[in-house]
Image (spheres, rainbow, N blue to C red):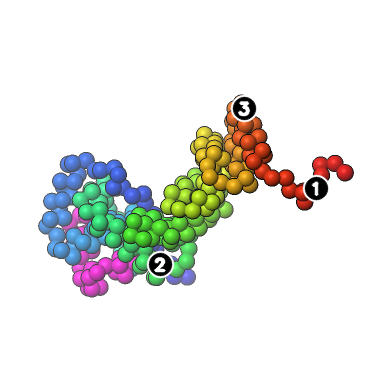
């Protein structure tokens, strides 16, 4: 069976952690010796991720196929990229700091545009898979300022649910929180935050689960959502053996705000 093209492993945006000045200077010296297609292709590769699929780079690049392939060869010759054995269809930076330095040297607007371009290419050329979903979540989230917040939320939520099914609860929690941060609707944000709290609970991060559950319980949410948040808070309190006073208060407040449902069966006949 043929291996489907890989979309480049999802990687955190490194622009908030600058590379050391010495590394930036070394990388800048090499970038300035590249042709224009060579430098722009290296910048695209830095945005792409840790594992850089040549086929998807070709689908994303603004240059022709021949020019882009020559640019990749040039980047390899200058030591900015290297092939990942056993084939030449995937490249990577020799060190994470090299990639970080390239990102540091790029204007923020170019990073945004390249993230959007990579997302479009992955969406149109890469077969459906968990990795594809993670890639689209990452790149659309990075490009959300360009109007891609809706797609970012969709793919982040899908990636989080897939991670939760695979018991990767830390990943699920992180992606649910990222999705919640991009949502304007209060009800939807609360739902995503509660999902994140559940995942933190299952991952053993009880403090973060309590913080998110309390945030929802005290926020602008309906009585049902407040009650669910209080239950999650209580669950994240008794598991590590904490006193239950705060949990009791949240549960009491939530129950007090809820209207009686006459269709509920009585506790006793």
Left/right placement of residue 104 relative to residue 116 reads: left
User: What is the C-alpha distance between the residues marked 3 and 2?
Assistant: 49 Å
Q: Nearer the viewer, residue 119 or 5?
A: 119
Left/right placement of residue 238 relative to residue 3 reads: right
Q: Main secondary structure of the magenta part?
A: helix
Indicate the quadrant containing the C terminus: top left, top right, bottom left or bottom right: top right
Q: Position of residue 17 (x, y in %)?
A: 29, 42
Q: Which residues are magenta?
A: 56-80
Q: Nearer the viewer, residue 7 or 227?
A: 227
Question: Circles 2 and 1: CB distance less than 8 Å?
Answer: no
Q: For numbered disc 1, what is the local secondary structure?
A: loop
Residue 231 visible in the displayed image: no
Question: Circles 3 and 2: CB distance less than 8 Å?
Answer: no
Residue 145 visible in the displayed image: yes
The residue wearing badge 3 is 245
Q: Position of residue 224 (x, y in %)?
A: 63, 47
Q: Residue at x 35, y 67 (%)?
A: 121
The residue wearing badge 2 is 123
Q: Which of pointers 3 and 2 lies earlier in the amino acid sequence?
A: 2
Q: Nearer the viewer, residue 3 or 57?
A: 57
Residue 41 higher or lower than 231, as above or below = below
Q: Which of pointers 2 and 1 lies earlier in the amino acid sequence?
A: 2
Q: Position of residue 110 (x, y in %)?
A: 24, 58
User: What is the C-alpha distance between the residues marked 3 and 1?
Assistant: 29 Å
- Magenta span contains residue 167: no
The residue wearing badge 1 is 265
Q: How many marks?
A: 3
- Magenta span contains residue 64: yes
Q: For numbered disc 3, what is the local secondary structure?
A: helix
């Amino acid at each position: 069976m043929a291996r489907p093209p890989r979309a480049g492993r999802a990687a955190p945006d490194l622009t908030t952690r600058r590379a050391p000045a010495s590394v930036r200077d070394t990388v800048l010296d090499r970038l300035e010796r590249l042709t224009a297609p060579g430098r722009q292709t290296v910048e695209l590769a830095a945005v792409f991720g840790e594992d850089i699929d040549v086929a998807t780079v070709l689908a994303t690049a603004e240059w022709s196929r021949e020019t882009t392939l020559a640019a990749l060869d040039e980047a390899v010759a200058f030591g900015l990229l290297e092939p990942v054995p056993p084939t030449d269809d995937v490249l990577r930076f020799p060190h994470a700091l090299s990639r970080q330095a390239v990102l540091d040297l790029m204007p923020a607007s170019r990073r945004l545009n390249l993230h959007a371009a990579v997302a479009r290419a992955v969406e149109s050329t890469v077969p459906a898979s968990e990795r594809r979903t993670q890639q689209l979540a990452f790149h659309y989230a990075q490009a959300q300022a360009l109007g891609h917040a809706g797609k970012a939320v969709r793919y982040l939520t899908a990636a989080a649910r897939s991670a939760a099914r695979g018991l990767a609860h830390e990943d699920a929690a992180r992606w649910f929180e990222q999705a919640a941060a991009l949502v304007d609707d209060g009800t939807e944000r609360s739902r995503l935050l509660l999902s994140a709290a559940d995942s933190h609970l299952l991952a053993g991060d009880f403090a973060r689960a309590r913080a998110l559950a309390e945030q929802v319980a005290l926020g602008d949410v309906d009585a049902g959502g407040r009650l669910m948040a209080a239950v999650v808070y209580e669950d994240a309190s008794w598991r590590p053996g904490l006193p239950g006073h705060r949990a009791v208060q949240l549960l009491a407040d939530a129950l007090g705000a809820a209207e009686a449902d006459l269709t509920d069966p009585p506790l006793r006949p």
